[in-house]
Image (cartoon, rainbow, N blue to C red):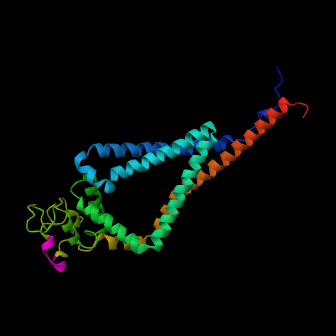
């Protein structure tokens, strides 16, 4: 049997296989998640009426899902290929993108805390726009109904905000059968109800605040949302930390791999130099 050749300096590599493939698997997981997000977003988008959808893109959950999915796909693709091919350019792109996203998230959290009044105004604007397009998008409609049931609220500031919607508007020239009504998700419902009365909010905007309170939730969702945030700061902090940790891990692994690849390139250049100049 022949003897094994002893390892030479050229066989040595600074690039750790553990770091390389750990970063690859890390990115592959989020790459597949991004494909699922894009697929769901495209499917939901195709199921809608294109002519009605164009007017409310800013509040369309399907569009938001596709945008986030595409961005995640591109970033994780750079991480996958960069780690597998040991490409410094792609790894730096991946690391820089994660750093920018992390900084933007941190800045958004700080600005939202410092300028809470302006943030509240922006949330009010988004909710009002969603109310206007409530009947135009089934996904948006389901999202609003879910929020109103979960938070036991109705409208933005009060239940009368539903008059902004053309179907629920209280104007005398409104021919809709839902005139001066509110969605069924505003109604006070007992848990043992077998059948949901979708007409329970009919004519509620014609009633006073106290009269309507016997049938529906009259408080707006903005105050309920603010109170929920104040009461669940630890939960929100945990969610924020859960989002930040994968980003920090990705940045750390990519920087470690980039430094290892640079050291390996220097070693290769050193070997080439001494091979071409044996008297050096």
Q: Quadrant of residue 132?
A: bottom left
Residue at the far bottom: name it: 210
Residue at the far top: name it: 1
Identify the main secondary structure in magenta.
helix
Horizontal arrangement in the rendering, residue 244 relative to residue 184 (left or right):
right
Q: Quadrant of residue 198?
A: bottom left
Is any atom of residue 230 visible in this view?
no
Image x and y of residue 146, in percent: 29, 60
Residue at 59% over, 40% down:
82
Q: Is residue 271 magenta?
A: no
- In this view, 81 is above or below 110: above
Residue at 34% over, 43% down:
42
Horizontal arrangement in the rendering, residue 274 relative to residue 35 (left or right):
right
Image x and y of residue 119, in percent: 40, 70
Horizontal arrangement in the rendering, residue 10 relative to residue 152 (left or right):
right
In front: 187, or 157? Answer: 157
Horizontal arrangement in the rendering, residue 184 relative to residue 268 (left or right):
left
Which quadrant is the N terminus positioned in? top right
Is any atom of residue 63 visible in this view?
yes
Image x and y of residue 59, in percent: 32, 57
In front: 280, or 228? Answer: 280
Q: Quadrant of residue 215?
A: bottom left
Image x and y of residue 217, in percent: 23, 72
In front: 177, or 67? Answer: 67
Residue at 28% over, 61% down:
130
- In this view, 31 is above or below 214: above
Q: Is residue 206 magenta?
A: yes
Which quadrant is the C terminus positioned in? top right
In front: 148, or 13? Answer: 13
In this picture, which residue range is highlighted in magenta? Answer: 204-211
Q: How many marks?
A: 0
């Amino acid at each position: 049997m022949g003897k094994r050749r002893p390892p030479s300096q050229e066989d040595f590599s600074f690039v750790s296989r553990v770091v390389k493939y750990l970063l690859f698997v890390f990115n592959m997981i989020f790459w597949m998640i991004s494909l699922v997000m894009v697929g769901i977003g495209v499917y939901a988008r195709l199921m809608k009426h294109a002519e009605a959808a164009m007017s409310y893109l800013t509040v369309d959950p399907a569009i938001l899902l596709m945008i986030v999915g595409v961005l995640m796909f591109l970033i994780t693709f750079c991480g996958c290929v960069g780690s597998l091919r040991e490409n410094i350019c792609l790894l730096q792109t991946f690391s820089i993108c994660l750093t920018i996203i992390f900084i933007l998230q941190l800045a958004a959290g700080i600005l939202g805390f410092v300028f809470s009044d302006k943030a509240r105004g922006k949330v009010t604007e988004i909710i009002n726009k969603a109310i206007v397009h409530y009947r135009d998008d089934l996904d948006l409609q389901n999202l609003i109904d879910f929020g109103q049931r979960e938070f036991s609220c109705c409208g933005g500031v009060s239940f009368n905000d539903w008059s902004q919607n053309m179907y629920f508007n209280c104007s005398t020239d409104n021919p809709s059968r839902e005139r001066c009504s509110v969605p069924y998700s505003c109604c006070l419902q007992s848990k043992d109800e077998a059948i949901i009365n979708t007409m329970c909010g009919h004519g509620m905007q014609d009633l006073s605040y106290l009269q309507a309170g016997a049938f529906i939730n009259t408080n707006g969702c903005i105050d309920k949302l603010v109170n929920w945030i104040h009461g669940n700061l630890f939960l929100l902090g945990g969610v924020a930390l859960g989002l930040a940790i994968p980003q920090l891990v990705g940045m750390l692994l990519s920087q470690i791999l980039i430094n290892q690849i640079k050291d390996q390139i220097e070693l290769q250049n050193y070997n080439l130099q001494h091979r071409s100049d044996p008297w050096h």
